[in-house]
Amino acid sequence: VQLVESGGGLVQAGTSLRLSCVASGSTASIDAMGWHRQAPGKRRELVASITRDGTYYSDSVKGRFTISRDNDKNTMYLQMNSLKPEDTAVYYCNAVSSWLDYWGQGTQVTVSS
């Protein structure tokens, strides 16, 4: 499974961005997908995930971010609204397939105050 993210950028606080993650390869075997982020000097954290059973959001983004997946396009999205400076990080796409983890290269999101 190969993953490629896009959609990051520099935005002002209070605005929105939509990240995309295109999967290729053995996409039919993907069990779960998610978005993680890593800010400078901090550990990578799970932001949101999506499986056949539903979605999960961290408390820090609940109500502001929405994760979705278009299986026909093999693409996962993260709609980020009401962005805050503390959302600044590199955002990584993740897929779990047959108990293996796959990662994209990351896309930078910078939110200015």
Image (cartoon, rainbow, N blue to C red):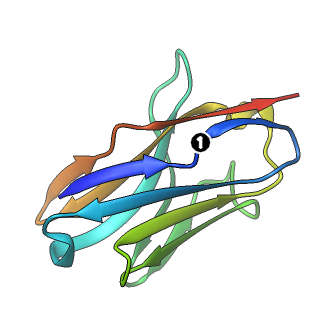
**Which residue sits furthest top?**
41
In the displayed structure image, the side of residue 33 where residue 19 appears, left or right = right
- Residue 106: x %, y % from top left: 42, 38
Give SS at disc 1: loop
Q: Residue at x 44, y 71 (%)?
A: 50
Amino acid bearing label 1: Gly
Query: Is 14 situated above or below 23?
Result: above
* Picture mark count: 1
Query: Is 99 situated above or below 46?
Result: below
Foreground residue among 34 and 60: 34
Foreground residue among 17 and 92: 17
- Residue 42: x %, y % from top left: 52, 22
- Residue 70: x %, y % from top left: 44, 79
Query: Is 61 situated above or below 73?
Result: above
**Quadrant placement of the C terminus:** top right
**Quadrant placement of the N terminus:** bottom left
Tell me the quarter of the picture where residue 10 sits.
Answer: top right
Q: Residue at x 66, y 31 (%)?
A: 88
Foreground residue among 107 and 101: 107
In the displayed structure image, the side of residue 22 where residue 41 appears, left or right = right
Q: Residues within 10 Å of mark 1 (few under 14, many from 20)?
A: some
Residue assigned mark 1: 8
Q: Residue at x 52, y 15 (%)?
A: 41
Q: Residue at x 35, y 50 (%)?
A: 4
Tell me the quarter of the picture where residue 73 sits.
Answer: bottom left
In the displayed structure image, the side of residue 112 where residue 69 appears, left or right = left
